[in-house]
């Protein structure tokens, strides 16, 4: 009995120690009242009268960006990798650089806060429709939606008793609040009241609403992703082939017709390399144990779990599956002068479709300047018809205009006020960015006029 109690005591202490595992970030910045925060979170601290600070980091499984800001000084961002975060402590000390107020910085009226949320509220997402701005605000366990006009004046507000992550406007202009488990469709009535329409599962949202990517020449353009098996199944092209089809809106077609395909060649090569390592490990295990080689015998059914015969192999399979589940590479459909362009940003390829729904041209996407800053992302301003490439230089967003005739984009003007905004979009000739003001504990929506 005594031994049992002792064992329970040590298990309890071990659990406490594991639960309290953290990395202490500390340092001296030489300036009082410098705000230090983790980017896109309200969590942070500030320096004392002598410039010292201490910030415990409890989540050590993901890379973080530390944001240092102080009135009269240049903002600074320091990135910490997951490997660095495994240490018990990290000393980050430097001298904040004073801001130089030259003539270009004085009187820049474009950088103004467009909207501020209430205290203890963050801004999770924004969307645009019918000359209105829809804003999703979050408290710890609940969300609210605010509707603004183009001047930032509040038109409507509604609180919800659950937490939502993002706003989505689908191909039918339905406004949907997307939660971790479920989604809620809402709309504005004639009196600008926000009314709920229906609730449905996150799975329905993923499988149905995201397939129609645009409308072109009287047809719906539909995207399908080839990974119809579970995560532990191997599939041709490793589940990263995107097929695009078209279906006439008048219902004159029995089934969708094929347009074109895109393959994530970079992701394919990475997964192929990992897959070869899994095969080598598997064959070695089979040889040592004199087991049946399912692959060479031709009796393997494609299920990766059946190959997990050693702990080492299982870890390799889990890493491989995490590669399969990585963020989907971006294909942007654009309607340009009665033509449809699919722009593959990762592969830098443009596929152009004519009005007869046939491929008329394939050519490369050119980044003419700011190559190392290009984020592989396009922003579409539906009100002006302009398309912008997104660039990041020292954590600040810049935009460059895309030329569909030459298939090129180059770095342009600075378009965000703060480093690494949580949300960044363009609409009506403005760039909108969302960040969190740790000092005032509230979300901020900023906008900048872009050419």
Image (cartoon, grey):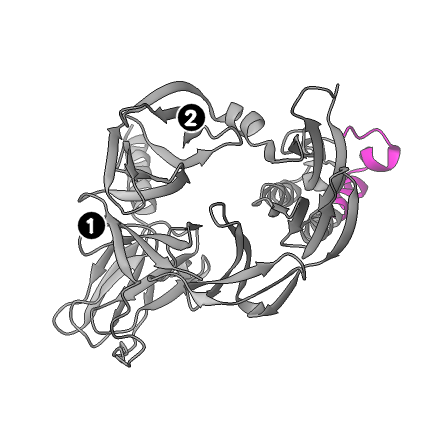
The residue tagged with tag 1: helix, strand or loop? loop
Image coordinates of residue 73 in percent, x first then y, are 25, 74
Give the residue drawn at x 40%, y 24%.
184
Quadrant of the frame with the N terminus: top left
Is residue 293 visible in the rendered image? The answer is: no
* Nearer-the-camera pick, 408 or 397: 408
- Classified by dominant secondary structure, the portion drawn in magenta counts as helix
Report the side of 32 relative to 451 (left or right).
left
Q: Which of the labelled discs sits on residue 183, or is there none?
A: 2
343 or 293, nearer to the observer: 343
Picture quadrant where residue 18 is located:
top left
Tell me which numbered mark, 1 or 2, is placed earlier along the sequence: 2
Identify the element where label 2 is drawn: strand
* Relative depth, front residue between 313 and 383: 383
Q: Note whether 290 is above or below 152 in the view shown.
A: above
- Neighbours of disc 1 within 10 Å: few (<14), some (14-19), many (20+): some
- For disc 2, the neighbor class at 10 Å (few under 14, some 14 to 19, many from 20) is many
Q: Start and end of the magenta stretch? A: 279-301
Q: Position of residue 58 (x, y in %)?
A: 32, 50
Q: Residue at x 37, y 52 (%)?
A: 432
Residue 297 colored magenta?
Answer: yes
- At horizontal 77% and vertical 48% (from top left) the residue drawn is 280
Which mark is on residue 441? 1
Q: From the viewer's perspective, is residue 357 above or below residue 71?
A: above
Q: Residue at x 72, y 36 (%)?
A: 234
Circles 1 and 2, Cβ within 8 Å, touching? The answer is no
Q: Is residue 35 left or right of residue 22?
A: left
Q: Position of residue 361 (x, y in %)?
A: 78, 51
298 relative position to 435: left or right: right
Residue 27 appears in which quarter of the rendering? bottom left
Q: Position of residue 162 (x, y in %)?
A: 31, 27
């Amino acid at each position: 009995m005594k031994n049992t109690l002792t064992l329970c005591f040590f298990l309890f202490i071990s659990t406490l120690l594991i639960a309290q595992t953290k990395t202490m970030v500390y340092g001296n910045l030489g300036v009082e009242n410098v705000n230090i925060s983790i980017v896109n979170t309200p969590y942070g601290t500030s320096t004392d009268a002598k410039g010292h600070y201490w910030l415990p980091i409890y989540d050590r499984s993901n890379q973080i960006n530390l944001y240092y800001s102080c009135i009269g000084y240049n903002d600074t961002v320091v990135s910490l990798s997951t490997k660095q975060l495994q240490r018990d402590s990290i000393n980050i000390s430097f001298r904040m650089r004073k801001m130089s107020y030259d003539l270009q910085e004085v009187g820049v009226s474009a950088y103004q806060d467009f909207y501020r949320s209430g205290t203890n509220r963050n801004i999770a997402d924004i969307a645009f429709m019918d000359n209105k701005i829809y804003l999703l605000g979050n408290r710890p366990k609940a969300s609210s939606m605010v509707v603004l006009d183009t001047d930032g004046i509040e038109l409507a507000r509604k609180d919800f008793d659950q937490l939502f992550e993002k706003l989505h406007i689908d191909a039918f202009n339905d406004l949907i609040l997307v939660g971790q488990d479920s989604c809620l469709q809402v709309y504005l009535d004639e009196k600008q009241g926000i009314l709920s329409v229906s609730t449905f599962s996150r799975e329905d949202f993923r499988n149905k609403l995201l397939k129609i990517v645009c409308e072109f020449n009287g047809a719906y353009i539909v995207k399908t992703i080839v990974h119809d098996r579970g995560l532990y199944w191997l599939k041709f092209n490793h589940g990263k082939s995107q097929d695009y089809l078209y279906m006439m809106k008048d219902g004159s077609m029995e089934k969708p017709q094929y347009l074109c395909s895109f393959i994530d060649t970079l992701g394919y090569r990475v997964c192929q390399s990992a897959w070869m390592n899994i095969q080598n490990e598997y064959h070695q295990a089979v040889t040592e144990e004199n087991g049946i080689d399912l692959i060479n015998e031709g009796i393997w059914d494609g299920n990766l779990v059946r190959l997990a015969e050693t702990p080492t192999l299982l870890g390799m399979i889990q890493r491989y599956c995490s590669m399969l589940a990585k963020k989907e590479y971006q294909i942007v459909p654009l309607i340009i002068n009665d033509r449809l362009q699919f722009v593959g940003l990762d592969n830098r390829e443009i596929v152009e479709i004519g009005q007869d729904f046939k491929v008329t041209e394939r050519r490369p996407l050119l980044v003419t300047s700011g190559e190392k800053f290009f984020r592989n992302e396009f922003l579409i301003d539906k009100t002006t018809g302009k398309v912008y490439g997104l660039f990041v230089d020292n954590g600040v967003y810049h935009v460059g205009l895309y030329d569909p005739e030459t298939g090129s984009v180059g770095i342009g003007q600075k378009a965000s006020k703060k480093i690494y905004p949580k949300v960044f979009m363009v609409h009506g000739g403005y760039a909108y960015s969302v960040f969190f003001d740790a000092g005032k504990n509230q979300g901020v929506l900023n906008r900048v006029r872009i050419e």
